[in-house]
Image (tube, rainbow, N blue to C red):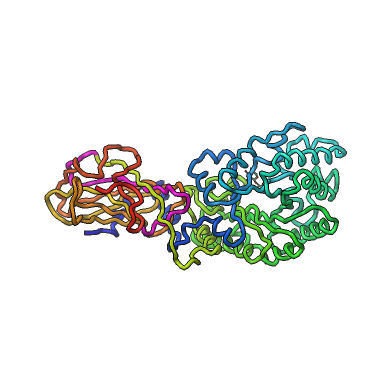
């Protein structure tokens, strides 16, 4: 007998606020219907359209194994969030340190990813010695910095943000040590120095709030037009795209991209995120998903738009909360590395599901178990289970089931089963007890656990699913010989719990 809908019954009501808060994580799993293309990564989907899909990253995050697994598998391009900036690479005049950036380029090489170098000349994260130089010495210092860094990364970096954020919001040039020393010429000087150091790298000017038509993008348009007229080496314009649901979508992004493309330039979305005033709610997260989708659609519509980089892929490592107090939740994956609705929107915009439902590998999963019930002779069986995605792509949960085998003993042949708690939300978990046609040693029934849908990011775990079952007459079990039972009270890989994708056994050993 199944009791699929009883999950959490009578139990969550009394939970402390902290746990009830965690139940909202469940919404991260409602990623829409599964398709065969679920197995394609964001980058594979983009590459099928002639674009890359990338993410920013930073050195400290790479020690987070689950984070690094998704970074390495889902994205075809990475940008160091900080490690190639001037304050890191030349903190003291003439003392260059490329150690951190080298870690990023090594990661990219291992994962077959390209790297956008970010950034050579910028007013921010600039060591104070540059601003303290007499203006007459700034050009030489800038040229030396560009030459050393672009030479060091030659071959490892495919594109450089040579100059970052040259403009004020009204389209006037931003004051910086470079502008003060050289006027607007510093941009051409920087581009020429970068080209001399690495003739193969694509050279970009990069800025924010130039995604739509407006004064600031007009200024960028005028500058790049002039640079091209003068024969200055320039390949593209980077639109950072730090968007916010409360500020609306950039005005005519696609038309704006197209006018740059029509000059013969590449366009890249270099730092996409969509922040919101916290807390998130359904309306904000829907708007966010729509903005992500619209950015992808704009890029797809403009041939010279070469790709999209998100400014890190997870809320766990977003720059937003510390920069914009009270705002956050800006990224495609939540703080638990679970994909959010925006992730599904990007996938759909990139054409996921357009393959006619062909093929698709079963997901790679494993089960972990802990015993939450010391008594082997009482009237309940209480396994704690968690499902982990061990594969390199998001795992579709809609047809994944787990089995926990046990023996029934005497008493009623009908059962009730329960999900008492899970961080993904018991409403997303299904469960029932099934009698086996052919009993085996230690097994004549199993508890089958499934999911209402959603997907699990590579390396991610559902977290604990606290399960419970009893016979309807509440007669006692003898769990001592049960096939799937273990005595460990903390989570460990459990080969006697099986995981199936559809009909296929993908983890564990059946009795
Ligand atoms: C941000 C980084 O993500 C943060 O870690 C750092 O503290 C500040 O800079 N525009 C840019 C990026 O060009 O370099 C910025 O990165 C985000 C805004």
Residue nearest the observer in this picture, 165 or 229: 229
Image spot of residue 201 (x, y percent) = 72, 49
Please report the residue visible at 37 percent of the width from the left and 47 percent of the height from the top. 366
Regarding residue 320, the answer to whether it shows in the image is no
Residue nearest the observer in this picture, 453 or 330: 453
The quadrant of the image that shows the N terminus is bottom left
Residue nearest the observer in this picture, 467 or 85: 85
Please report the residue visible at 59 percent of the width from the left and 44 percent of the height from the top. 108
Is 23 colored magenta in this rendering?
no
Is residue 395 left or right of 245 when viewed as pictured? left
- Is residue 82 placed above or below 451 in the rendered structure? above
Please report the residue visible at 81 percent of the width from the left and 48 percent of the height from the top. 192
Is 389 colored magenta in this rendering?
yes
Image spot of residue 61 (x, y percent) = 55, 41
Regarding residue 345, the answer to whether it shows in the image is yes
The quarter of the picture where residue 49 lies is bottom right
Q: What stretch is highlighted in magenta?
A: 374-399
Image spot of residue 46 (x, y percent) = 57, 59
- Is residue 221 placed above or below 443 in the rendered structure? below
């Amino acid at each position: 007998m199944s009791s699929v809908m009883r999950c959490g019954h009578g139990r969550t009501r009394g939970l402390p606020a902290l746990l009830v808060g965690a139940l909202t994580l469940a919404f991260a799993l409602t990623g829409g219907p599964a398709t065969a293309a679920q197995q394609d990564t964001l980058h594979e989907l983009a590459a099928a359209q002639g674009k890359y899909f990338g993410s920013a990253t930073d050195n400290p995050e790479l020690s987070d194994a689950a984070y690094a697994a998704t970074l390495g598998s889902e994205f075809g391009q990475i940008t160091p969030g900080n490690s190639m900036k001037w304050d890191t690479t030349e903190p003291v005049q003439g003392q260059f340190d490329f150690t951190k950036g080298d870690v990023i380029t090594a990661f990219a090489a291992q994962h077959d990813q390209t790297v956008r170098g970010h950034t050579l000349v910028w007013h921010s994260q600039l060591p104070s010695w540059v601003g303290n130089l007499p203006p007459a010495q700034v050009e030489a210092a800038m040229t030396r910095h560009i030459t050393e860094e672009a030479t060091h990364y030659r071959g490892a970096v495919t594109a450089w943000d040579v100059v970052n954020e040259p403009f004020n919001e009204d389209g006037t040039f931003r004051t910086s040590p470079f502008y003060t020393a050289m006027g607007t010429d510093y941009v051409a000087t920087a581009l020429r120095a970068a080209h001399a150091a690495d003739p193969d790298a694509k050279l970009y000017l990069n800025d924010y709030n130039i995604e739509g038509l407006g004064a600031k993008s007009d200024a960028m348009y005028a500058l790049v037009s002039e640079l091209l007229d003068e024969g200055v080496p320039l390949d593209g314009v980077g639109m950072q795209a730090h968007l916010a649901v409360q500020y609306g979508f950039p005005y005519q992004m696609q038309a704006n991209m197209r006018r740059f493309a029509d000059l013969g330039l590449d366009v890249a979305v270099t730092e996409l995120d969509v922040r919101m005033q916290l807390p998130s709610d359904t309306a904000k997260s829907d708007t966010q998903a729509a903005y992500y989708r619209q950015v992808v659609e704009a890029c797809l519509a403009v041939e010279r738009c070469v790709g999209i980089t998100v400014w890190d892929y997870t809320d766990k490592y977003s720059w937003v909360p510390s920069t914009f107090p009270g705002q956050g939740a800006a990224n495609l994956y939540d703080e638990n590395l679970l994909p959010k609705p925006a992730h599904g929107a990007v996938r759909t915009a990139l054409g996921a599901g357009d393959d006619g439902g062909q093929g698709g590998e079963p997901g790679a999963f494993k089960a972990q178990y802990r015993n939450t019930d010391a008594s082997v002779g009482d009237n309940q069986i209480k396994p704690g289970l968690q499902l982990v995605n061990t594969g390199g792509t998001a795992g579709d949960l809609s047809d994944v089931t787990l089995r926990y085998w046990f023996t029934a003993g005497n008493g009623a042949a009908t059962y009730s089963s329960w999900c008492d708690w899970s961080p993904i939300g018991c409403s997303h978990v299904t469960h029932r007890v099934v009698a086996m046609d052919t009993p085996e040693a230690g097994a004549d029934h199993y508890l089958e656990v499934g999911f209402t849908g959603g997907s699990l990011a590579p390396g991610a775990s559902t977290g604990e699913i606290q399960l419970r079952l009893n016979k309807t007459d509440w007669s006692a079990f003898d769990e001592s010989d049960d096939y799937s039972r273990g005595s460990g009270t903390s989570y460990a890989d459990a080969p006697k719990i099986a995981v199936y994708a559809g009909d296929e056994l993908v983890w564990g050993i059946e009795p």
